[in-house]
């Protein structure tokens, strides 16, 4: 996946502002692809130049005008072409600062490594709580991001639940792994 395809996929639901796109990104696909607001706006500019996205200014009385983005027919074609192709790899990108530090942990006291692992568990347990909340709020979040103009289909919700379920199961496994590592350190 690329940022381009993530944005096109979200715009495929409904027109949206860049700011609301970032909020939706954070609450929906952030578990599989992250992006900053500046990256999203930069990509929206590129997509508009390529003809995959159009925009219009929406006037507002009590606030500044806002720019609303919409996927074009060509953008839909490119998105669907990408969506129907198999990915080159099924492995997640590997950039994990925590694991890199753990690789070199022989340079630390075992108590410091244990502290790292305990912090890791604490972070993952907090993340588990957010997954539960995200699953309950998904429909509401998507509707709000699209100014309550878009209704998710049952199939959309099903596949979004698949993503959250994978994240939950992965997280549970990582917590178990960290606890076993602590146990080994203590023995």
Image: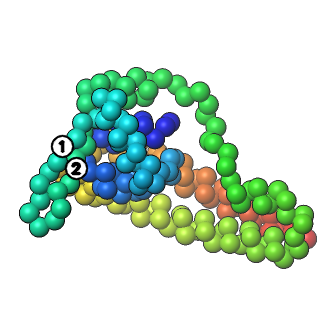
- Location of residue 134 with respect to 46 vertically, above or below: below
Residue situated in front as seen by the camera: 174 or 150? 150
Of callouts 1 and 2, the N-terminal one: 1
Q: Are marks 1 and 2 in contact (CB under 8 Å)?
A: yes
Question: Which class describes the residues within 10 Å of circle 2: few (<14), some (14-19), or many (20+)?
Answer: some
Q: Tag 2's secondary structure?
A: strand
- Residue positioned 47% across, 65% down in the render: 130
Within-10-Å neighbours for mark 1: few <14, some 14–19, many 20+: few
**160 sits left or right of 98 in the view:** left
- Residue 6 marker: none
Residue pictured at 54% horizontal, 55% vertical: 168
From the viewer's perspective, tell me whether residue 74 is left or right of residue 81: left
Q: Position of residue 62 (x, y in %)?
A: 11, 67
Q: Position of residue 152 (x, y in %)?
A: 27, 45
Residue 65 in view in this figure: yes
Q: Residue at x 47, y 60 (%)?
A: 131
Q: Which residue is mark 1?
A: 56
In the image, residue 66 lies at what x, y percent?
20, 54
Q: Is residue 131 above or below residue 52?
A: below
In the rendered image, which residue does mark 2 sit on? 67
8 vs 147, left or right, is right
Q: Please say whether residue 9 is visible from this viewpoint.
A: no
Which quadrant of the rendered structure holds the C terminus? bottom right
Q: Which of the two residues, 15 or 55, is positioned nearer the viewer here?
A: 55
Instruction: Give the spatial CA distance, label 1 vs label 2.
Output: 6 Å
Most foreground residue, 9 or 18: 18
Give the quadrant of residue 94: top right
**What residue lies at 34% left-to-right and 60% top-to-bottom?**
137
């Amino acid at each position: 996946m690329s940022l381009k395809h993530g944005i096109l996929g979200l715009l495929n639901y409904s027109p949206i502002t860049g700011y609301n796109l970032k909020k939706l990104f954070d609450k929906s696909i952030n578990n599989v692809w992250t992006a900053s607001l500046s990256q999203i706006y930069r990509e929206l500019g590129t997509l508009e130049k390529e003809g995959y996205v159009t925009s219009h200014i929406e006037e507002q009385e009590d606030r500044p005008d806002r720019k609303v983005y919409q996927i074009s027919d060509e953008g839909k074609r490119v998105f669907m072409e990408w969506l129907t192709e198999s990915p080159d790899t099924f492995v997640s990108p590997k950039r994990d600062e925590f694991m890199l530090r753990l690789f070199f942990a022989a340079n630390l006291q075992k108590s410091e490594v244990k502290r790292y692992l305990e912090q890791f568990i604490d972070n993952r347990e907090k993340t588990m709580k957010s997954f539960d909340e995200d699953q309950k709020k998904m429909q509401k979040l998507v509707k709000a991001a699209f100014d309550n103009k878009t209704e998710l289909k049952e199939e959309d919700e099903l596949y979004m639940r698949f993503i959250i379920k994978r994240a939950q199961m992965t997280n549970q496994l990582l917590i178990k792994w960290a606890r076993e590592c602590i146990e080994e350190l203590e023995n």
